[in-house]
Amino acid sequence: MIAHGISEKNKGKGFMNRKIRQIICVILSLICVIAIWDKPVLAYEKSSNYSDIDSQIKKEIKELHIPGMAIAIVDSKEVLFSEAYGNCDNLDTPFIIGSLSKSFTSLAVMQLVEEEKVDLDTTISDYIDTSDYFINVSDGDKITVRQLLNQTSGLGTYQRFGNAKITESYGQHQYANINYGLLGEIIETVSGISYSEYMDKNIFSPLSMNHTAATLVQSKENGLITGYRNYFGLPIAGEPDYPDKHSWSTVPAGYLSSSVSDMAKYLQMYLNGGMGIVNQNSLNTMLYDNVYVDDNTPYYYGMGWTLTEEYTEPVLGHSGLVENYMSNMYLLPESGLGITFLINMNDYLVTNQLADIISQNVIFALLGREQYDISGSPYIVRHLLLNGAYLALVAVAVYPIATIRKWKKKKQTTRLILFDITRHGILPLLLLCLPYMVGIPLWVVWYFVKDLFIVLLLNASLLLVIGLYKIFFAIFKI
């Protein structure tokens, strides 16, 4: 009878062990499903009437709880449509534009190429002291300026100044902010002035981009709109994590600020052969001297621009994302159009994907294609599912606290001890290492998905603390 009783208890513990594993798997699967949720189905028909586009955007940003947004559609001669929404007061309000900054940096490099101060196929060690940036100084003798621009330098996605090194991806496209950080350093060294001064003098001022800046101080003086991060479905205002030169992302890679009115001028420059900023040959190099990314992402990457053929005509573009802003810009060369979108929120797991559909719908409208329907409160549904997954994950950690009295009365068998080691030792480490297991450092989760970071840290901390308590109880019977 005793042996039978122990066997039944062990079966119970094994059952609970399996259940916890199943719960964790379900929770992680839910998070993954939400993160890669398919686009909504194609639904309503296009209208090239800009009032229809305006009405549709108003509906969509309300559905997605976007605080503020601005859009402009231009051709080579005029602004065809522009509008500010939500808490964006006017078209001159600047946003941080994220990786749209990369094309500005590329443009500056091409100016220096035209002046014969930089050669695209010369190694970067000719322009900067690579000992300040690389683990192996000789790496600077292998990387050309063109490779930085096309992101084929072999530098890793999450590398920073000081720990840069060439990886096995050398010669192949690997997106890395450090490439454009290094280009910013080259611009400063070759020109003899700061990056912000160079951009003001040679790009912003000539294009009358009076609400565009390369410093946080100037951005705020220009009226930088407040940005928002999303916590558990709630947009919360916050300051940008503006970088220094040793940050993962730098100003040349992702922290210029601009207004939609200024971005309209910027896109018109491309549609007008450079307007004296650079010549047409330099623009062609930027836009079309590109590299194929891979079969999983069938597009080409140029010098701060991507080229995709998924539409009825080739579309050039780039997206931008920082902690509390996102953006998109597009050029449709055959139609002679440019489109830009600026948004003052980052909601990485939900809104960002849906907001991209807003910009795609505008392109579809302009090209006469059906558009995606994002009605039906996908924002609410996805956040409810995500928050449910978060809550279940925390419940796994809270359960041992709620049952601690019952645990104290149990006989400490080998199976129970192993189970506790798994739950309070291995599981917390697994949760904290989970981002690394999918190729993302935990600090990147902190920057972009703070609510997930909070849940992972809280869950791991609770499990570890109660695990330590159990150890002390077992030793001292407290």
Image (tube, rainbow, N blue to C red):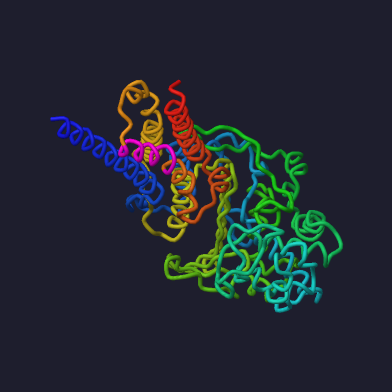
Quadrant in which the N terminus is drawn: top left
Please tell me whether the stretch drawn in magenta is mainly helix, strand or loop. helix
Span colored in magenta: 414-426
Q: From the viewer's perspective, tell me whether residue 95 is left or right of residue 398.
A: right
Query: Where is residue 239 shown, x and y percent of the image?
Result: 65, 37
Nearer to the camera, 354 or 22: 22
Residue at 74% of width from left, 41% of height from top?
Answer: 222
Query: Where is residue 303 shown, x and y percent of the image?
Result: 63, 68
Magenta span includes 416: yes
Q: Residue furthest bottom?
A: 121
Q: From the viewer's perspective, tell me whether residue 383 is left or right of residue 3.
A: right
Number of labels in the image equals: 0
Query: Where is residue 383 shown, x and y percent of the image?
Result: 40, 37
Query: Where is residue 170 shown, x and y percent of the image?
Result: 59, 73
Residue at 30% of width from left, 26% of height from top?
Answer: 410
Residue 377 visible? The answer is no
In this rendering, is residue 122 above or below 265?
below
Residue at 38% of width from left, 38% of height from top?
Answer: 423
Residue at 53% of width from left, 45% of height from top?
Answer: 445
